[in-house]
Image (spheres, rainbow, N blue to C red):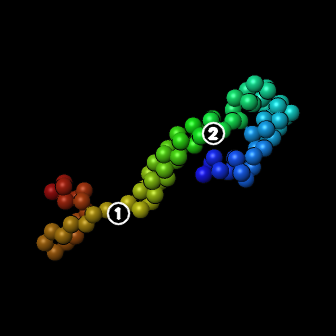
Amino acid sequence: MQLASFEFITPNYFTTATQYAVSSGALTQPEAEAYFNLRNYLIQGTLATPVMGIVTTAIVAIFTRRTKKIEVGERELSHAEAMAD
């Protein structure tokens, strides 16, 4: 998907991004060329995607976590209470 985006949708992206980074003083020409290229973006995407998936999963898990209820006789206990007895 990234390859199609950079080759067909915005083919001048890396050139334009490099020129802007240099003209704004954020990077030198060699630094900008090393950072703004297809190989670097593919590596970043390959590494960042699983990391962001794990982070998102952890956040969702925190908000959707439920306490197990265990029935003991006539009263209902949480899992922690049942293990303490």
Residue 37 in view of the camera: yes
**With 44 as the anchor, is 30 left or right in this view?**
right
Compared to residue 85, the image places residue 31 above or below, namely above
Residue closest to the eye, 4 or 15: 4
Q: Residue at x 79, y 26 (%)?
A: 28
Res 78 → quadrant: bottom left
How would you rate the neighbour count of disc 2 (Cα within 10 Å): few for under 14, some for 14-19, many for 20 or more? Answer: some
Residue closest to the eye, 39 or 65: 39
**With 44 as the anchor, is 59 left or right in this view?**
left
Q: Which mark is residue 30?
A: none
Compared to residue 75, the image places residue 45 above or below, namely above
**With 25 as the anchor, is 59 left or right in this view?**
left
Question: Furthest residue to the left?
Answer: 73
Residue closest to the eye, 14 or 26: 14
Q: Residue at x 75, y 30 (%)?
A: 32
Q: CA distance from mark 1 to mark 2?
A: 39 Å
How would you rate the neighbour count of disc 1 (Cα within 10 Å): few for under 14, some for 14-19, many for 20 or more? Answer: few
What percent of the width, then of the height, locates residue 63? 45, 60
| In this rendering, the label closer to the viewer, 1 or 2 | 2
Res 48 → quadrant: top right
What percent of the width, then of the height, locates residue 25? 83, 30
Ranked by sequence position, the earlier of labels 1 and 2 is 2
Residue placed under numbered mark 2 in the picture: 41
Residue placed under numbered mark 1 in the picture: 66
Residue type marked 2: Tyr
